[in-house]
Image (cartoon, helix red, strand yellow):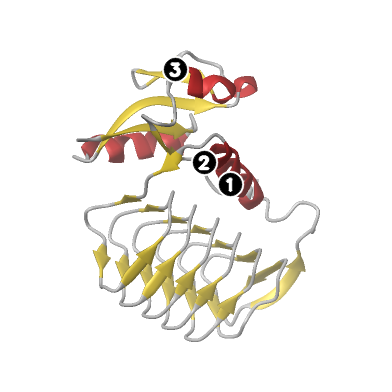
Amino acid sequence: MKDKIIIFGVGDFAKQIYYYLSESDNYSVECFTVDKCYIDRNELLGKKVVAFEEIEQEYPPESYKFITAIGYKSMRKRKELYERIKYKKYEFVNYIHKSVVINKPFYIGTNNIILSDVVIEPNVKVGSNNIVYSGTVIGHDSHLDDHSFISIGNKFSGFTHIEDLCFIGVGSIVSDNVKISRETLVGAGSLVLKDTFSLGIYYGVPAKRQKEIDNALGIRIE
């Protein structure tokens, strides 16, 4: 029996996730939802768009599950949204594309989206509420904690640790035994050879701390 899914989001990424889920034998997308103030249509891709404030009235948590399809503009907003949905007692699903290579043992939380051609080596632990884009390789014994966005084509060597609320730009490489500390932004095409410190923007080959991130705002990408 298919899980009945609510997608949070109405943007391009939400539409992309709808197409992926529609190809799966495990899920049936029932509706989209966003906060009432952002609703500018009644339907999207033939499905109702429902105000999140009222979602449980028509789609109760005992019958429906969530996946969040918002992108990378604010890591803290991703975390906040995840917690708001949990507060309403909904369960989440993970979406893992059929082309993903998973070598066990593998441990994963909830509300993760892992897209095509990702390779996950043995003994990797993935937390909750992460997006891992296509072509990424996660080396053995690595940890990806919570609420992060991993762009296309990243390479993480063995024993790397990505803490909460990070953004890793397209085509970056993180060397073995390196820790990407909480709320680090790594710019595209960077080579990270040493541990980062929280609330920093790193880029270059090798990557160096180039800017500070405002602690009041966290990572914000316009």
Q: Which amino acid type is marked by label 1?
A: Arg
Residue at (36, 29) in percent of width and height: 63
Quarter of the picture holding the N terminus: top left
- The residue labelled by disc 3 is 58
Residue picked out by circle 1: 78
Up/down of 2 relative to 39, above or below: below
Q: Name the secondary structure under disc 3.
A: helix
Residue 40 % position (x, y): 55, 16
Q: CA distance from mark 1 to mark 2?
A: 7 Å
Q: In front: 136, or 190?
A: 136
Asked if marks 1 and 3 touch (Cβ < 8 Å), the reply is: no
Q: Which residue type carries mark 2?
A: Ile
**In the displayed structure, does residue 130 sit left or right of residue 118?**
right
The percent position of residue 64, horizontal first and vertical second, equals: 38, 31
Who comes first in sequence, dot 1 or dot 3? 3
Residue 184: mark: none
Q: Is residue 212 left or right of residue 82?
A: right
**Is residue 218 or residue 111 the one in the foreground?**
111
Q: Residue at x 55, y 55 (%)?
A: 147
Tag 1–tag 2 contact (CB < 8 Å): yes
Residue ranking furthest to the top: 42
